[in-house]
Every structure is written in structure tokens, then in C-alpha cells.
Amino acid sequence: MNTKEKYTTKDLEIEFGLLTFGAALEAHRKCEEVSQKDFAKMLEITPQSLCDLEKGRRIPSPQRAAKIARKIGHPENFWLQLAFQDMLKQENLEFSVSVA
């Protein structure tokens, strides 16, 4: 894939399977080489809350997802898409959320 092309969550799913909010958050933290404790502090949440998010035991509210996106300097729509997708999956609803 050309790096100048737009790389979407659909592209990620094709290569790696369904992307979840928690998996993306954990991957981001690990790529930045930050401990859970330090990352939680940066996000202004407890380390246990971060662990629960990363392991998929909790799905963030839209407000929390947007706040996390702002804190890490990423587009809010990407993180909101993942959070909504996880919410729908948790309710066993077959519906794909995508952002243009």
C-alpha cells in the first residue's frame, strides 16, 4: 500500500482482523514505549481503568473516547468510531461504523 494513500480501519481489519478501541489504545501506548502507569497518568485516568480499556473489559463513553484522542493528539473521529463499534458488538448488533 502506498503510504500517501488514506489508510482506513477497513484496511487494518483486512490485514489484522477487527480492531477494537482497547487493542488500538494498547498498541499506541506500546509504540510510544510508555508504561501503563505513566500512560494512565497522561490520560488522567487510573491505571486500572486503562487496563480495563485495553483488555476490552470496559468500553469508553463517547466523551471519554474523544478526550483520550485529544490527549494523544489523534483525530477524535477514529477513536469514536472504534468505541461505537465496540458498543455495537457488545450488544450483538451486526452494524459497521465508518467515518468518511
Image: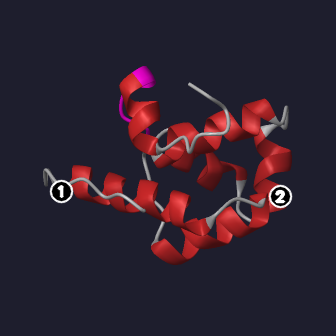
- In this figure, which residue is indicated by the disc labeled 1? 91
Q: Which mark is residue 41?
A: 2
Q: Nearer the viewer, residue 93 or 43?
A: 93
Element type where label 2 sits in the image? helix
Query: Which residue sits at x=64%, y=50%?
Result: 50
* Residue 89 on the magenta span: no
- Which quadrant of the view contains residue 93? bottom left
Query: Which residue sits at x=76%, y=41%?
Result: 36
Element type where label 1 sits in the image? loop
Disc 1 marks a residue whose amino acid type is Glu
Specify whether residue 80 is in view: yes
* Residue 18 on the magenta span: yes
- Which quadrant of the view contains residue 49? bottom right
The tag earlier along the polypeptide, 2 or 1, is: 2
Query: Which residue sits at x=71%, y=63%?
Result: 45
Of helix, strand and loop, which mostly describes the magenta segment? loop
Q: Quadrant of the N terminus?
A: top right
Q: Which residues are magenta?
A: 15-19
Give the image location of residue 86, x and y in percent: 34, 52
Q: Residues within 10 Å of mark 2 (few under 14, many from 20)?
A: few
Side of 77 relative to 59 (left or right) = right
Disc 2 marks a residue whose amino acid type is Lys
